[in-house]
Image (tube, grey):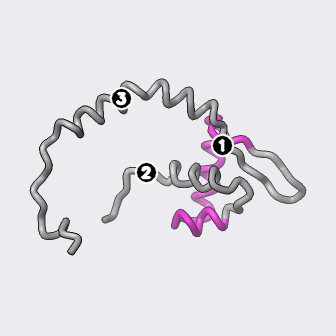
């Protein structure tokens, strides 16, 4: 499968949430993208208020801003509800040979 429901932004945010002391190199290796891409994502998430950065000596620690996530989740709750209703009402697609796990 060449795509995923969780974007690289979400995957970086989850990696930071799991361990705020991880380096960009470690996050890049875990997510499977370049260090440069991780840096751009961290800067964008920080500018949007999702991450807070603090220095600890020569290292930077990122902390997830749960308040910002809560505010966004409230704003998007209606859209998520609508999507879940659509998914629940949808008829399952017939399984194709490519979908067969066995």
Q: Earlier in the sequence, mark 1 or mark 2?
A: 2
Image vertical order of residue 28 relative to residue 72, above or below: below
User: Residue 44: x, y in percent?
Assistant: 61, 43
Circle 2 residue: 6
Tell me the number on the disc at residue 79.
Answer: 3
Report the Cα–Cα distance between label 3 and label 1.
23 Å
Residue 26 magenta-highlighted: yes
Comparing 89 with 39, the one in front is 89
Circle 1 residue: 64
Most common SS among magenta residues: helix
Find the residue positioned furthest to the right: 57
For image coordinates 63% across by 50% down, the residue present is 17
Q: Is 83 on the left or on the right of 55, as rendered?
A: left
Tell me the number on the disc at residue 33.
Answer: none
Callout 3: helix, strand or loop?
helix
Report the Cα–Cα distance between label 2 and label 3.
16 Å
User: Residue 57: x, y in percent?
Assistant: 90, 56
User: Residue 45: x, y in percent?
Assistant: 61, 43
Quarter of the figure that contains the N terminus: bottom left
Q: Is 11 on the left or on the right of 55, as rendered?
A: left
């Amino acid at each position: 499968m060449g795509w995923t429901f969780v974007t690289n932004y979400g995957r970086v945010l989850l990696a930071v949430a799991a361990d705020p002391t991880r380096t960009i190199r470690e996050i890049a290796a875990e997510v499977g993208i370049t260090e440069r891409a991780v840096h751009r994502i961290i800067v964008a998430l920080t500018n949007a208020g999702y991450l807070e950065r603090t220095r600890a000596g020569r290292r930077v620690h990122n902390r997830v801003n749960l308040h910002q996530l809560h505010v966004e989740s409230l704003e998007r709750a209606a859209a998520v509800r609508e999507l879940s209703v659509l998914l629940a009402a949808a008829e399952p697609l017939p399984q194709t040979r490519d979908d067969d796990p066995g």
